[in-house]
Amino acid sequence: MIHHVLDRSRELGFLGPGSIDDQIEHSERFGLVLDSLPPDGSSSDNLSVTSSRPLVADIGAGGGVPSLPALVGRPDLDAVLIDASQRRCSFLVWACSELDLTDRVSVWCGRVEEVAHEDRARARFDAVIARGFGPPAITAECASGLLTTGGHLVVSEPPEGRSWPAEPLQQLSLRQVPSVDDGFAVFRMEGEPMETFPRPAKTQQKRPLF
């Protein structure tokens, strides 16, 4: 069924090149990284076995990856899929129904930098996942408003990696931590999100933090 859903995503122009099997495999690796993360700074229990079900946000989720393959067969996780495009959100609603995920997965249509200031989203998520969302500075800033203290941001990285300087990340209360998979950058939310972050999209583009 997941192949059927992602084939439809590609037909609609929402999914990039590469085999569907490779897209699924890469998406499932997000789940493995999430499994390795403690829910706070001291617990040895991983994110998937906490007493309450972890809540994960996929930002820029419109094509259905990584969230849909990662969530199939994972009843231990609840999720919110966030995308700014109404067409993509309509697809995600359909996809969640096809995959029988509607009891634990919601779709929110809106720009992440705006959604992150809403009461329903602010500092609510145990983890944020991002694949191809944008440059490092914009990804980190947008995610920071969603994460609860002790939560984690997991970002897919290109083979050559990207720069995530520690000092500007500290402004967002984020600290990079080791990842079990070299293809991902992982960050821990060290405190409450600053009230001013994330800034409007135009401000981030004109004056990125790094």
Image (spheres, rainbow, N blue to C red):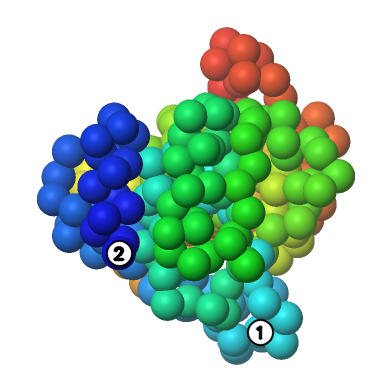
**Mark 2 is on which residue type?**
Met
Q: Is residue 33 left or right of residue 40?
A: left
Q: Is residue 43 above or below residue 171?
A: below
Residue beneath the point at 49% across and 57% down? 96
Q: Residue at x 81, y 39 (%)?
A: 118
Look at the image and tell me in which quarter the N terminus lies: bottom left
Give the number of marks. 2
**In the figure, 46 relative to 88: above or below?**
below
Residue at left 57%, top 11%?
A: 206
Image quadrant where residue 84 sits: top right
How far across and down, in percent of the image, does residue 38 sit? 59, 77
| Callout 1 amino acid | Thr
Q: Residue 160 sits in which quadrant?
A: top left
Closer-to-camera residue (1/209): 1
Which is closer to the viewer, label 2 or label 1? 2
Kindly identify which numbered label has been placed on residue 50: 1
Residue 149 makes an appearance in the image: yes
Mark 2 and mark 1 in contact? Answer it, CB < 8 Å. no
Q: Element under label 2?
A: loop
* Residue under label 2: 1
